[in-house]
Amino acid sequence: MTSDAGDIGAADAPRGGIRASDAERERTAQSLRDDYAAGRLSGDELDERLEASYRAKTVEELRSLREDLPALGLAPRELRADMVRRRAELRRRLFQHAGGSFTPFAICTLIWAASGADGSFWPVWVLIFPLVFVLRNAWRLYGPAPELDRVQAELEHRSGGSGRRGRHRHRHGPRRPELP
């Protein structure tokens, strides 16, 4: 009779083994985000797997979400450290680019103030463009699904244009003074 009771208890246990805790779901979700940041998952794959991780009832369901990804261990810590370093570097570069884009706003504000500061504060319209740039890229750096590669590509594109012009000028050597 005791063996029958044991069989009934085993039949009542969920398939796939042990039930997953909220902490295990969150660890799996974070590791999926880390794999996305490393380029192993696309945005759509990340969204699907995150939804599945929060719906998972068992540890086995959580494991199945990671079966085609590298094993957990030191890699996520190293990945996280790399992401922190990349974010810091990209944040520094973002502020450098943003600083230059706020210069027209500062000049327009000085013009507005020098002209008597009458009427509405029209330089605010010049401020919109650098704010959009900073806010969009800050969301890409620190949002729920970081897009570090996208921020890096945009910053390189912005700095690449001026860098190419600078190299082009120096290719021909210094300018010679013209004779009278």
Image (cartoon, rainbow, N blue to C red):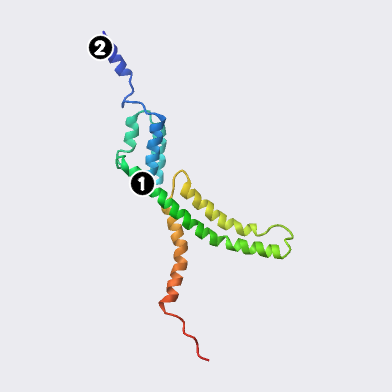
Q: Nearer the viewer, residue 156 or 99?
A: 99
Disc 2 target residue:
3
Looking at the image, tell me whether mark 1 or mark 2 is earlier in sequence order.
Answer: 2
User: Does the image show residue 98?
Assistant: yes
Residue 20 vertical position relative to residue 38 in the rendered view, above or below: above
According to the image, label 1 marks what residue? Answer: 79
Near-viewer residue (48 or 79): 79
1 or 2: mark nearer the eye: 1
Question: Type of residue at label 1?
Answer: Leu
Asked which quadrant contains residue 127, the reply is bottom right
Determine the residue positioned at 33% across, 26% down: 18
Q: Is residue 51 above or below residue 161?
A: above
Category of crowding for the residue at label 2, using alpha-carbon neighbours closer than 10 angstroms: few (below 14), some (14–19), many (at least 20): few
- Going by the picture, which residue comes out furthest to the top? 1
Q: Position of residue 149 (x, y in %)?
A: 41, 53
Where is residue 178 drawn, in percent x and y? Answer: 50, 88
Secondary structure beneath label 1: helix
Q: Verify CB contact (< 8 Å) between mark 1 and mark 2.
A: no
Q: As shown in the figure, which amino acid type bears the numbered disc 2?
A: Ser
Pointer 1 local density, CA inside 10 Å: few below 14, some 14–19, many at least 20:
some
| Apparent side of residue 162 relative to residue 41 in the rendered image (left or right) | right
Residue 143: where, in percent of width, then height? 48, 45
Residue 87 horizontal side relative to residue 103, left or right:
left
